[in-house]
Structure formats: C-alpha cells, structure tokens
C-alpha cells in the first residue's frame, strides 16, 4: 500500500462534534507505518493552522476539531460529493461554459493572485492571462469579496483557438491522460489484499488514495469525457470496496458519499 500522511490519519478520526482519544489516533498511525514523532509534528501543524485543539498530553490526551477545521474539511470534500453525483448521473452538464476574468491594481496583487490560485485549485483552466474557464459554476466556492476583482460570463458557443467541439475543448484544456494516471494509487489500493489489516487502516489507505486522485481531477462532466471513463469506473469500485470493509472507527462520522 502507498504511504499515507499523518494528517490523513488524524482527519480520519476527528469527529464533526466531540473529541477523539489520542491513543486511538496514535495506534492507527503506528499501524499505518507512521511513528509517534511524525504524528506529533502533524498535530502541532494542524493546531498552528487553527484546525484542531489538543486537550491533555501524549496518548492520554484528546483532539477536538475547531469550527475552522470543520469548514476546511467540508470544503475539501465537496469534490468527493461532486464526483459521486456525476457518477450516479445526478449532476449533468447544462451545456454552458463559465468564464472568469481576474484583474486588480498592483496594490491588490495578493488578492488577485489568490483568486487565480483558487480557480486553478477548483479545476478551472487558464485561457489567457487572467482569464479562466470551467464547465462548472464556481461562484459559490469563491470568497464574497471576489466580485471586486472579477468579470464573469456564461457561454454556450465557444471557440478556443480554433476548437469548437465541447469534447475537444475539454481534452485540449484538461487532457485525459494525466487525470487517468492520477488514479493509479486508487487502482493499487483496490488491488491490495491485506486481510490481517484492521478495518480502520484499510479505510485510511483507501480514503488517502481517492482523496489524492480527486485533488488532481478537475471533475469535468461525463458528457465531456470519452465513455467509459476510467476514473468513474475506479470510483465505483472504490465505493463497493469501502462498503465491504464494514464498520470502522475511521471516518465513522464523516459522510463519504457511497452512491
């Protein structure tokens, strides 16, 4: 199995409400191949970022997620929810492209650059300097003050450097090959057979593989991808294997969509 980060292990056990004994987290981290020092460092970094609080010391302590931490994870998992909705045929493309132009005076350069990074992180592709495109309406994901620096448009008739066919546009801007390659870890996690590994550890490795793949996937609507689409097939296999693992403490209070 591919290595997992200490942060992934911590997040696997953090409940939406309440706390988790650090002994549980340490045991799972050790079983996942991480030592105590690596875990302690990850916890300190998450505390410094405002994502959690630690009560008590060592294995006798407990971890509590902050409101900021809950919001960050909720935001991170929106992509998992979108993938599940697409795979189930519940999220369809409306045939419109969304264009975002980001500009700002030099005095607001940091805000401008931050917005551009956000758009790319949300899967938008750059068309030219300061202009980005997505098949998704990303407005709700952007901060309220984004309107000060943006011009947006909705287009159903698009020509991208001589390419007009929507599927060809998608392949030009979001090539399929690197997206498919990003799911290799998912494929490996699905193929691994470790019957002596606990349900918690199996869930952690499965979740880590999928979250890493989703992070690299712009989740272009299925209508714009060749069918069958390998990432969608692997996500469906992932959900079946997740259910097969059965009850576990890891991710017990998080909604990982299983449609």
Image (cartoon, grey):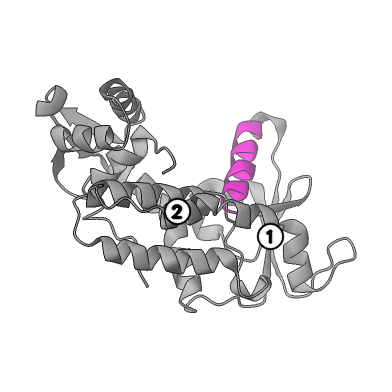
Q: Earlier in the sequence, mark 1 or mark 2?
A: 1
State which quadrant residue 26 falls in: top left
Write the residue at 27% across / 56% down: 254
Q: Is residue 225 above or below residue 174?
A: below
Place of residue 156 in the rendered image (x, y in percent of width and height, measured from the top left): 73, 75
Q: Is residue 38 above or below residue 176?
A: above
Q: Is residue 54 above or below residue 12?
A: above
- Closer to the camera in the image, 119 or 236: 236
- Closer to the camera in the image, 150 or 229: 229
Write the residue at 23% across / 44% down: 13
The residue beneath circle 1 is 176
Place of residue 107 in the rendered image (x, y in percent of width and height, measured from the top left): 66, 29
Q: Are marks 1 and 2 in contact (CB under 8 Å)?
A: no
| Alpha-carbon span between mark 1 and mark 2 | 17 Å
Q: Residue furthest right?
A: 162
User: Which mark, residue 148?
Assistant: none
Quadrant position of the C terminus in the picture: bottom left
- Taking the image as shown, residue 111 lies to the left or right of residue 206, namely right
Quadrant position of the N terminus in the picture: top left
- Taking the image as shown, residue 82 lies to the left or right of residue 20, namely right
Place of residue 220 in the rendered image (x, y in percent of width and height, measured from the top left): 61, 65
The residue beneath circle 2 is 210
Q: Residues within 10 Å of mark 1 (few under 14, many from 20)?
A: some
Q: Which region of the structure is painted magenta?
A: 109-123
- Closer to the camera in the image, 211 or 17: 211
Helix, strand or loop at mark 2: helix
Place of residue 210 in the rendered image (x, y in percent of width and height, measured from the top left): 45, 53
State which quadrant residue 20 falls in: top left
Residue 205 visible in rendering: yes
Asked if the magenta segment contains residue 186, the reply would be no
């Amino acid at each position: 199995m591919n290595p997992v980060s200490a942060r992934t292990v911590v997040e696997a056990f953090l409940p939406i409400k309440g706390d988790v004994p650090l002994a549980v987290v340490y045991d799972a981290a050790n079983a996942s191949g991480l030592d105590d020092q690596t875990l302690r460092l990850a916890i300190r970094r998450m505390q410094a970022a405002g994502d959690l609080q630690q009560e008590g010391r060592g294995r006798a302590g407990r971890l509590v997620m902050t409101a900021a931490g809950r919001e960050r994870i909720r935001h991170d998992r929106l992509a998992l929810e979108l993938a599940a909705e697409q795979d189930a045929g519940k999220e369809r493309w409306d045939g419109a492209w969304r264009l975002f132009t980001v500009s700002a005076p030099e005095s607001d350069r940091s805000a401008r650059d931050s917005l551009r990074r956000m758009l790319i992180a949300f899967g938008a592709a750059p068309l030219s300097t300061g202009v980005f495109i997505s098949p998704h309406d990303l407005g709700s994901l952007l901060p309220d003050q984004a309107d000060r620096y943006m011009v947006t448009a909705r287009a159903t008739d698009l020509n991208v450097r001589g390419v007009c066919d929507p599927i060809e546009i998608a392949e030009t801007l979001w090539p399929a090959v690197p997206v498919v390659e990003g799911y290799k870890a998912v494929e490996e996690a699905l193929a691994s057979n470790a019957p002596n590994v606990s349900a918690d550890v199996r869930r952690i490795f499965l979740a880590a593989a999928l979250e890493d793949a989703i992070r690299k996937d712009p989740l272009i609507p299925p209508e714009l991808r060749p069918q069958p689409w390998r990432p969608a097939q692997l996500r469906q296999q992932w959900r079946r294997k997740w259910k097969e693992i059965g009850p576990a403490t890891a991710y017990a209070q998080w909604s990982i969509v299983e449609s």
